[in-house]
Amino acid sequence: MADLGKIDGDFFDEYIYPNLGADREDEILSPQHGVDFGVIDVGGKAVALATDPVFIMPSLGFERAAWFAFHILMSDVAVSGMTPTHLSIDFNLPPEITDEEFATIWETFDAEAKELGVSVVTGHTARYAGCNYPMVGGATAIAVGEFDDLVKPNGAQVGDKVIITKGPAVEATGLLSIQFEPLMEGEMDAEALSAAKDRFYDMSPVQDALVAAAAGPVTAMHDATECGIYGGLYEVARSAGVGIELETDAVPVLPGVRETCDFFDIEMWHAISEGTLLATVSPEGVDDVLAALDAEGIPAAEVGEVVSGSGLVVDGEPTDHPGIDPFWGAFEENMGKLADLQ
């Protein structure tokens, strides 16, 4: 069986990168493994685009699931530093979804889009046999802005400082604690379980990215999705051709995260963490960025530095990309346990 989750860099380099269609002069940033978005030049405007699955987990409740799905779609383009402006979306729905359930999803998308100023410009919606939750389609989020406002993912420079918001395993904690609450009740401290469930609405880096980019000279941003903080920082370093040194003691860890990761026996530094922003910042901008994030109630800290060389060094030890995110294995294993319980 192939590994679950995103493909690794070797797969990308062998199968995808050599086959990217026509070369065009308006393409400013082309696909790279671990890079969140691409950029084209349209009439002198920067247009950032990011495509992701539409991820709907009915067990979260359709309103909550739709909130999360929308913010997943916005996050990869928000780390461009430009506010998302447009959305193109395709729903390939399971046959069993009701009109009322879809209405809840779409009304939630509409409300979140209006709050962010995003217009839905095109799409496709249908029920198809063989389509299953949670992956029920795909979408492209778009941000249109000035090139001066664009934060390129490969912009980290030697001497920059590293800022992380919210810390490790935010998404793994939020999703696992809600999905598998019946397995955790009585087996995990009740206060820690409640805190873990509170992580759900931390699972968006959109505000983090836009606040950081507006506050100071941010040179690169990345959301810590699959393979978590270690994977994300490794990708930032590889993209820019630099090294990154990380001090784990400086990283904020939100309540409920350690306990949840211990319960599911997953490494929190390797675990998916949608909602966690990884940013490199010019030294003179660090205080301004941290102050702006704090003013919005977003936990953040300076946790390391960009150095010459390559790859990731954690607490003085060279550290490889994790390769496989432990979230997916834990999710699959415990779905079976949950079915047995029910």
Image (cartoon, rainbow, N blue to C red):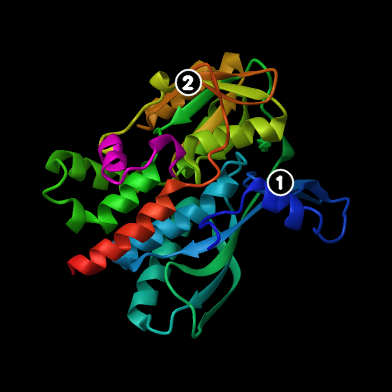
Q: Of the residues shown, which amino acid type is indicated by label 1?
A: Gln
- The part of the chain drawn in magenta is 257-271
Badge 1 density bin: few <14, some 14–19, many ≥20, Cα 10 Å:
some
Secondary structure mostly seen in magenta is helix
Q: In which quadrant of the rendered view does residue 170 lie?
A: top left
Q: Residue at x 32, y 43 (%)?
A: 265
Q: Residue at x 30, y 38 (%)?
A: 257
Percent position (x, y) of residue 295? 38, 27
Work out whether residue 65 or residue 307 is closer to the camera in this orientation and state it.
307
Q: Residue at x 20, y 44 (%)?
A: 193
Q: Do labels 2 and 1 touch, CB within 8 Å?
A: no
Look at the numbered disc 2 and give the secondary structure of its residue: strand
Q: Quadrant of the C terminus?
A: bottom left
Q: Of the residues shown, which amino acid type is indicated by label 2?
A: Val
Percent position (x, y) of residue 45? 75, 47
Name the residue carrying label 1: 32
Name the residue carrying label 2: 303
**Is residue 199 among the parts visible in the rendering?**
yes
In screen coordinates, is 330 left or right of 339? right
Percent position (x, y) of residue 125? 53, 78
Q: Residue at x 36, y 42 (%)?
A: 266
Q: CA distance from mark 2 to mark 1?
A: 25 Å
Tell me if residue 31 is in the magenta stretch: no
Badge 2 density bin: few <14, some 14–19, many ≥20, Cα 10 Å:
some
